[in-house]
Amino acid sequence: MDFFLQLLFTGVGIGAVYALVALGFVLIFRATNVVNFAQGEFSMVAAYLMVVFAVDLGLPYWVAFLISIAGMALLGAAFNLLVYYPLRNRGFLPVLISTIGASIFLGNTTLALYGPQPQVLAGWLDTPGFQLGPIYLDSQYLVIVTVTLALVLFQYWLFEHTLLGKKLQATSQDKEMAALLGVPVALMIMFTFVYSAVLGGIAGILVAPVLFVSIQMGSAIALKAFAATIIGGFGDVAGAIIGGFAIGIVETLGAAYISVPFKDAFAFVVLIAFLALRPQGIFGERVAEKA
Amino acid sequence: MMRGSLPGLSIYALVAVVAVALAATVKTDAYVANILMQAATYAIAVFGISIVLGLCGQINLAQAAFFAVGAYAVALGTVDYSLPFWLCLLVGVGLAFASGALLGLSTLRLGGHYLAMVTISFQQILTVVLINAIRFTHGPDGVSSIGRPAGFQSSQAFLALAIAAMAISGYFVWRLGRSRLGRAMRAVRDNELAASAAGVDVFRTKLTAFALSAALGGLGGGLFAGGFSYISPDQFAFADSIVLMTMALLGGVASPVGSALGTGLLILIPEWLRFLKSVPGLYLAIYGAAVVLIVIFMPDGVWGFVGRLFARAPRAPSSAAEPLMLAPADSGGEIALEVRDLAKHFGGLKAVDGVDFRVRRGQVHALIGPNGSGKTTMLNVVTGLYRATRGAVSVDGVDLTALPPHKRTTAGLARTFQNIRLFRSMSALENVVIGAERDGNRLTVGDASAVLARARSALAFVGLEERMHQPIPSFSYGHQRLIEIARALAANPTVLLLDEPAAGLNLTEKKALHDLLDRIAAQGLTILIIDHDMTLIAGVAHHLTVLNFGKRIADGATAEVLRQPAVVAAYLGAA
């Protein structure tokens, strides 16, 4: 039982990272109707930026964090301008392929610049963790869960209680109508990409001390985050968060009780089972095309 | 549609035979032979992508995995189980086909992003299994000394075999694009709703495309294993699936020639750019950037780009089309279409709430009502795009309520859409051909030339035969409406359903539409029409059913209904 609780804690921690990346997926999907397959690369790039500024240049952790996040905002903007915007009127498939191309570009440019050796990034807190009854609470996992919850609350406030949030929602529901009502749609989409890149970046920086910082970390996280969005119900914010935690827990338990080498396959098995049995996910995607 | 194909085909056959003969006889050094072997086997897999992505518009990010299925079937079969090569190849292709079909079954009903995700998942799971199930797959070390069939033991003979297989697969894909199935795939790619309304079984078409694509992946992989005698899991990773897709995109995903061209380019260019591989990642970074650039600047690939430079102006037809025959009024029972107590609720909104009406054979029956009264919802429930909350729909006395849209088309419905839905990458004629070849069209069953003649007649009927080879975007809005009507007429339906055909037309076009409807009605075809233009409705309709707030408020002969106070009130507001 203690072992199980310990695993549950780890699963929730890693699940929080998936949830953050999944949020990025959902936001971009709602704004553009396109899945951004480079979402995971945002996390990877941010983790490398932290390695550059905090480890290589030795800046204080929070300074490096702010610089990295600013860098992610720029990357999100550039991504929108170069990868999405030229294709915005060409339907779903070209954009999807374009984001896949961008993901390969980002991953391998980082590889070319930084080499294949995984890097180590220290955690935010100096204390490694503490014992709470039967389970050991790793401090970085606590940071991950806390920051994730804070971001989720922030996002709820942003979307439900600010004018900017209303405009973003209007953009995601009906771009033409939103534009007619004076919502600057192009700017809202730009904001969405910037915000999603920042979310993905924070997720990458949070998870870096737990994993190694490597070229592959992005696609591994993104695939599971994507699975989380489908399990939660595509396009649903709450679903993405719950799906993220679910994938994190399933994967951790699967690795411990079934097989470590097949750890990365569990999320996909769960995903395919969901697609076969309940494709609309826990909360249900609202899909309907008007004739 | 077969214009110019015969000379092109004989050139293709000649080139293929010469290539196979050269490969079988001319000695090349091992380096060149390896590159050719890789190109030929990859090209077969890329042809698969040109079916699923090019023809059918569905994404497959696991082609390297299907390639691996074929390769491992041949490798493990010949090495561990001493089975004959041909049997292993057959099993490999069959397994790839089956796994493609299974993956498709789980996701093709859903949107494209699910398919992308599931194919990636399959790719990742397979890679994990190939590496970790060591007792079965030999693990990361791979499989060596893979067997070849008798008669093709030498590398040179096997290369000739691979090139021959490539040529035949390429021909198969080219033929597929011109077949009924290929047209259905393109229809699904261009507009799924219109395809199902035209009688195409969208799900089965996608599934077939996906499984065929996977099977070609398996074939390429099986030959690859025989050609190189050694395989390992790292040759079939996700990155390789991307490479295969990029090959198709670069060359031109819509055509097998483009796919082969793209494969050749992406195998040769890296050889020339070998020096880039000294910096790990640089080469793939350029690859990734190239994918983005190709998608943005060369949407039809190199071959599509070249093709546009040499495109010939389409010729007008030389002979006249036969007059169009439509379903006559004097056959079958008195009621062509019957709607009983039909309801469609969206949550709490009762868009249609218990409506009855009967459309008599040979009549023009109009469904009118203010905006939001449920007319289009009614049409969508009748044609099966929406599932009815309750009630029944029958055509010729046959209950259609439980059938999917394409089956209702088979049963005799044909419709147009309020916002025009044509297959925009095709010519006017091809659009109408898809209508003509619906299952259940007695006039054209199993006869390609009858389909073509029927489609031409339908276009001639709406006055656009001269321009039949032109692509859809070159037609005006009004003409696009006519093509959509021609597509529905070509299907030889029992009932023609028109959803606001006059919307957006100017006065001249409306007058032409009125004439056209009169000519259709004169032949006795039963029509159910929705429109807001009361001049048009009063002029063509024999019978009116009026809806308001999802309920029927009037039903009867046109002149009578238009005098009823409730109808006047609904339209003009109560006085």
Image: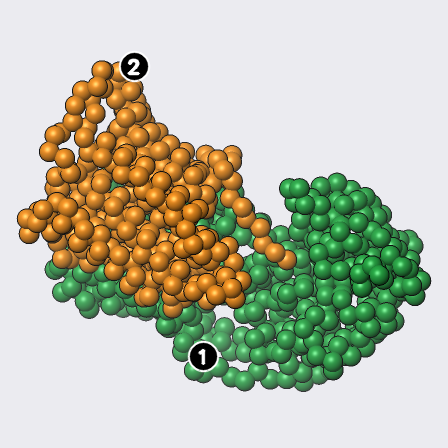
Chain colours: A orange, B green
Quadrant in which the C terminus of chain B appears: bottom right
Viewer-proximal residue, B35 or A15? A15
Tell me residue B206's x, y (percent): 53, 52
Crowdedness of circle 2 by 10 Å Cα count: few (<14), some, many (20+)?
few
Q: Amino acid at mark 1?
A: Arg
Mark 1 — on which chain does it sit?
A: B
Instruction: Name which residue lies at 22% across and 56% down.
Output: A70
Looking at the image, residue B538 lies above or below residue A18: below
Looking at the image, residue B205 lies above or below residue B171: above
Q: Quadrant of residue A258?
A: top left
Where does label 1 land, which residue? B308
Where does label 2 land, which residue? A1
Relative placement, left or right, of B17 versus B483 is left
Tell me residue B30's x, y (percent): 20, 61
Relative placement, left or right, of A62 versus B257 is left
Viewer-proximal residue, B55 or B530? B530
Instruction: Name which residue lies at 91% across and 63% down.
Output: B563
Quadrant in which the N terminus of chain B appears: bottom right
Viewer-proximal residue, B340 or B286? B340
Relative placement, left or right, of A243 versus B138 is right
Marks 2 and 1, how far apart at CA: 68 Å
Mark 2, secondary structure of its residue: loop
Q: Amino acid at mark 2?
A: Met
Mark 1, secondary structure of its residue: helix
Viewer-proximal residue, B320 or A275? A275
Tell me residue A91's x, y (percent): 47, 62
Crowdedness of circle 1 by 10 Å Cα count: few (<14), some, many (20+)?
few
Looking at the image, residue A282 lies above or below residue A164: above
Q: Which mark is residue B495?
A: none
Instruction: Name which residue lies at 69% across and 75% down.
Output: B505
Q: Quadrant of residue A88?
A: bottom left
